[in-house]
Amino acid sequence: MALRHGVEVVPVANMDASGAHDSYLRLPYTFPPGVLTEVIARLTAAWTELTGPSDDRHGVS
């Protein structure tokens, strides 16, 4: 879904040898603030499209 919104994500589990963090995403914080703001906006739109606007199980509404 994120890719449809122009953001490619990799699950943290792919980078975590224990596999314990399979419900997290890693964002490169070295991007300029404007890029990070846009990434968050796009991920929010993708999450809303996936779950619907009233889903706040993960703090997203």
Image: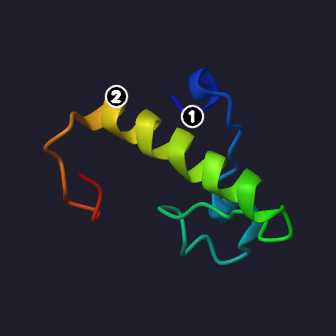
Q: Which mark is residue 25?
A: none
| Amino acid type, residue under disc 1 in the picture | Ala
x, y percent for residue 44: 43, 45
Give the alpha-carbon distance from disc 1 to disc 2, as whole Å: 10 Å
Q: Residue furthest front?
A: 34
Please, is residue 17 above or below residue 58 in the view? below
Colour mapping: rainbow
What residue is shown at x 17% (from left), y 47% (from top)? 55
User: Which of the 4 quarters of the picture holds residue 59?
Assistant: bottom left
Q: At numbered mark 2, what does the secondary structure look like: helix, strand or loop? A: helix
Residue placed under numbered mark 1 in the picture: 2
Residue placed under numbered mark 2 in the picture: 49
What residue is shown at x 67% (from left), y 64% (from top)? 26
What residue is shown at x 70% (from left), y 50% (from top)? 10
What residue is shown at x 54% (from left), y 75% (from top)? 20
| Amino acid type, residue under disc 2 in the picture | Glu
